[in-house]
Image: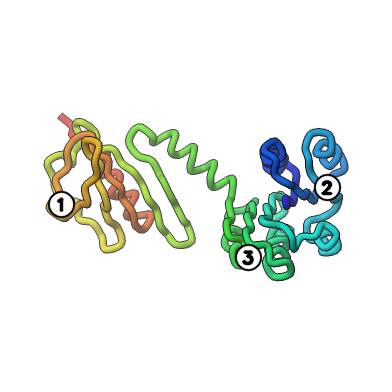
Amino acid sequence: MIIGAGDIGMPIIHYLSERGHLLTVIEKDETRCKHISDHADAAIFKGNGDDQEIWKNAEAAKMDALMALTNNDRINITACRIAKKDFGIPFVIARAHQPEYVEKMKEAGADVALCPSLETRRLFLNAIESRTAETLYEKQRADFKLVMVTIPQNGAVIGKTIDQLNLSENCKVAIVFRNGTFIFSTESFMFKGEDRALVMGSSENVERIVEKLRNVEIT
């Protein structure tokens, strides 16, 4: 079941339809409903995603999963709550238009809540920093960040140990990848050029250590 056939919902509807999934779509825009009818195999209900009468007519209790993909955070939150509490849909995915609604959607029942603007930000920052560092995961509310850093050939930390980085208690170099294998790092571990270090912890401290790891030796 998909609520919202906009910029995100429509491509997903086409993708799932082409692969033979049985789809039910709730969309308020008549033009989009007609497009779905002409180009995808789906049961279509014209209306708002928070209209429980539509949910009953769509037999929502039989759904395996729900995607709440409108650009209205209030409707998506309501849809998550209806899906879980009223119809027992086992797996719920929600789109958060604004980052501050991600946790609210999870509280309402979303198993997964994604904010496209946050994901886009992460991808662009990774594109800028991809030569030396890549953010693999970030959770702002928990103040947590996971970054993979490549030590430059002339890196300032080459020959130094993890202990010399002066890590705080809430930051850790967990694993270092070297020559096709991985090493669980210890305080006495010594860095070499082209090592790839996995750094995790609070965002501010991770960013500080990442800068140390990718700095180059000035000659």
x and y percent of residue 35 in the render?
82, 36
Residue 109 marker: 3
Q: Is label 1 in a helix, a strand or a loop? A: helix
Along the line of sight, the residue nearer the viewer: 3 or 166: 3
Amino acid at the residue labelled 2: Ile
Quarter occupied by residue 54: bottom right
The first of marks 1 and 2 along the sequence is 2
Q: Is residue 215 visible in this depiction of the protein?
A: no
Amino acid at the residue labelled 3: Gly
x and y percent of residue 69 in the render?
69, 50
Q: CA distance from mark 3 to mark 2?
A: 24 Å
Residue 44 marker: 2
- Residue 97 vs 16, above or below: the answer is below
The first of marks 3 and 2 along the sequence is 2
Question: For the residue carrying disc 1, how many other residues have a C-alpha within 10 Å: few (<14), some (14-19), or many (20+)?
Answer: few
Along the line of sight, the residue nearer the viewer: 115 or 205: 115
Of the two numbered discs 3 and 1 in the rendering, the one whose residue sits closer to the viewer: 3
Q: Is label 2 in a helix, a strand or a loop? A: strand
- Residue picked out by circle 1: 164
Relative horizontal placement of residue 146, taking residue 121 as reference (left or right):
left
Along the line of sight, the residue nearer the viewer: 51 or 103: 51
